[in-house]
Image (cartoon, rainbow, N blue to C red):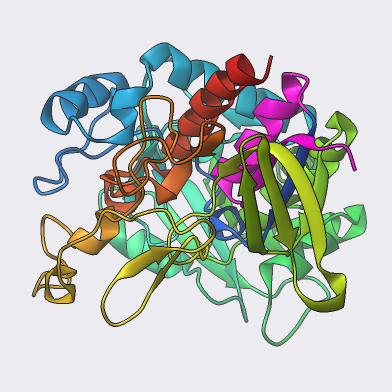
């Protein structure tokens, strides 16, 4: 079997970005991995919003935040990518999503304040176009109605209004979703709304409640692959601007992103082994032979290079026992607190976070992991995303941006070594 140019290990933001960037540059790509962080995403693409985390300082200008971060935290992975590489990577990523019908928007060189399911404000770099009218409603504090549904867990319009006491003209309503009763699930609701008649029935239920509302917010269930078509149809039916607010994970945003990559990567030539973990690796001077899956369904895959994008504990990139944290695929050394008692702070919400959340693999400037002796583990092995050491993406609000930018830099360097 002819070796692939690159095996991408992982199917979260970093894995999908790496597969996209490699395929766009003419490399033959194979990808394997189980459920990743993308499946539980809010749909927002964060670049950097909080630094320092112990101060909780929120930045409107993410590039000013990056400059401060690089001065304060010289080991952070963002110190290995330039602002230009970051913006180029995110632009290429969102252009792909747009081509798959998943529109993203934002402001030039600025984070945008947007609503969360809890009613709090989150600053993010890019957000789905279906949420943008909510940004404008929030900024102007215009009269608005937020609708939720009997049986839908993880989204309360009343809670949002209570948290947003600074928005006096925000009203709420709870209604029955057309044709569905009992416990509701976002994906089922999204599929239902592909039917124009269901949208007509939904608008008929909401119309008597509008009052002076100029905007109407819904939980993010307005379609799976045709969200903006659903939004525009509801706007026509209601005569109001319509927007989505993410539900708590698992939300519909993850399946939307997953579906976009499922649709778009295969035509680029990416061969995907869905829901298969890498269970064995044979390393040689010219590359790797990796085993995906186990038992009778196991597949051996030769590749000249590999990108490790397995995430941390949730993505099974890191595994822990009672004494240490290990990297699961190659056995690469993991930077971590020296003893388990130092993994966590005494306070759950400690201002500086928990040291275990910065555990990960060390790399060189091109994101090639380092072995036990501090030298490159393999000349064509790379790492990207959450598995990298010295970053706390959740608290810094930089998860997607970090994943996409480091995947971009890794692929860029890989191309120079393969050609």
Image-quadrant location for residue 327: bottom left
Which is more toward the observer, 197 or 288?
A: 288
Percent position of residue 30, x then y: 77, 43
Residue at x 68%, y 74% (from the top left corner): 185
Residue name at image x 77 percent, y 59 percent = 274
306, 184: nearer the viewer: 306
Q: Which residues are magenta?
A: 1-27
Seen from the viewer's position, the closer of residues 170 and 192 is: 192
Q: Position of residue 48 (x, y in %)?
A: 33, 34
Q: Is residue 400 left or right of residue 321?
A: right
The answer to whether residue 126 is visible is no
**Residue at x 86% of width, y 71% of height:** 297
Quarter of the image that includes the C terminus: top right
Magenta stretch contains residue 229:
no
Residue at far front of view: 285
Residue at x-position 76% and y-position 25%: 27
Tell me: residue 346, above or below residue 170: below
Query: Compared with residue 38, is residue 106 higher up or lower down, i.e. above or below?
Result: above
Q: Is residue 345 something that shows in the picture?
A: yes
Q: Position of residue 85 (x, y in %)?
A: 46, 16
Magenta highlight on residue 9: yes
Left or right? Give the position of 314 relative to 70. right
225 or 151, which lies in front? 225
Using residue 21 as the reference point, say whether residue 193 is left or right of it: right
Location of residue 158 (image quadrant)? bottom left
**Location of the N terminus (image quadrant):** top right
């Amino acid at each position: 079997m002819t070796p692939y140019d690159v095996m991408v290990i992982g199917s979260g933001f970093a894995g999908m970005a790496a597969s996209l960037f490699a395929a766009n540059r003419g490399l033959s790509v194979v990808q394997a991995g189980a459920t990743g962080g993308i499946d539980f995403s809010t749909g927002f693409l964060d670049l950097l919003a909080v630094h320092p985390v112990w101060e909780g300082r929120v930045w409107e200008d993410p590039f000013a935040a990056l400059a401060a971060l690089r001065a304060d935290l010289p080991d952070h992975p963002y110190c290995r990518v330039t602002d230009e590489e970051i913006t180029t990577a995110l632009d290429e990523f969102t252009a792909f999503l747009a081509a798959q019908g998943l529109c993203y928007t934002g402001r030039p060189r600025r984070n945008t304040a947007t609503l969360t399911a809890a009613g709090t404000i989150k600053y993010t770099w890019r957000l789905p176009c279906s949420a943008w009218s909510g940004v404008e409603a929030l900024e102007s504090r215009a009269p608005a109605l937020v609708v939720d549904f009997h049986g839908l867990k993880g989204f309360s319009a009343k809670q949002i209004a209570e948290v947003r006491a600074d928005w006096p003209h925000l009203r709420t309503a709870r209604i029955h979703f057309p044709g569905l009763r009992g416990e509701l699930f976002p994906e089922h609701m999204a599929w239902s709304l592909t039917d124009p008649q269901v949208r007509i029935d939904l608008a008929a239920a909401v119309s008597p409640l509008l009052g002076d509302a100029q905007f109407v917010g819904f939980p993010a269930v307005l379609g799976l692959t045709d969200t903006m078509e659903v939004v525009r149809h509801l706007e026509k039916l209601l005569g109001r601007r319509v927007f989505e607010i993410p539900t708590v994970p698992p939300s519909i945003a993850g399946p939307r992103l997953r579906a976009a990559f499922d649709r778009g990567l295969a035509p680029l030539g990416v061969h995907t082994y869905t829901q298969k973990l890498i269970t064995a690796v044979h390393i040689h001077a010219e590359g790797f032979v990796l085993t995906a899956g186990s038992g009778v369904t196991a597949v051996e895959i030769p590749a000249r290079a590999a990108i490790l994008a397995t995430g941390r504990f949730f993505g099974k990139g890191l595994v822990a026992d009672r004494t240490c944290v290990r990297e699961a695929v190659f056995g690469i050394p993991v930077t971590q607190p020296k003893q388990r008692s130092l993994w966590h702070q005494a306070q759950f919400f400690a201002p500086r976070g928990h040291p275990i959340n910065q555990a990960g693999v060390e790399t060189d400037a091109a994101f090639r992991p380092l072995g036990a002796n501090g030298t490159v583990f393999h000349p064509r092995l790379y790492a990207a995303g959450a598995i990298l050491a010295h970053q706390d993406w959740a608290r810094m609000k930089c998860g997607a941006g970090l994943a996409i930018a480091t995947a971009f830099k890794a692929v860029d360097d890989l191309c120079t070594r393969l050609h």
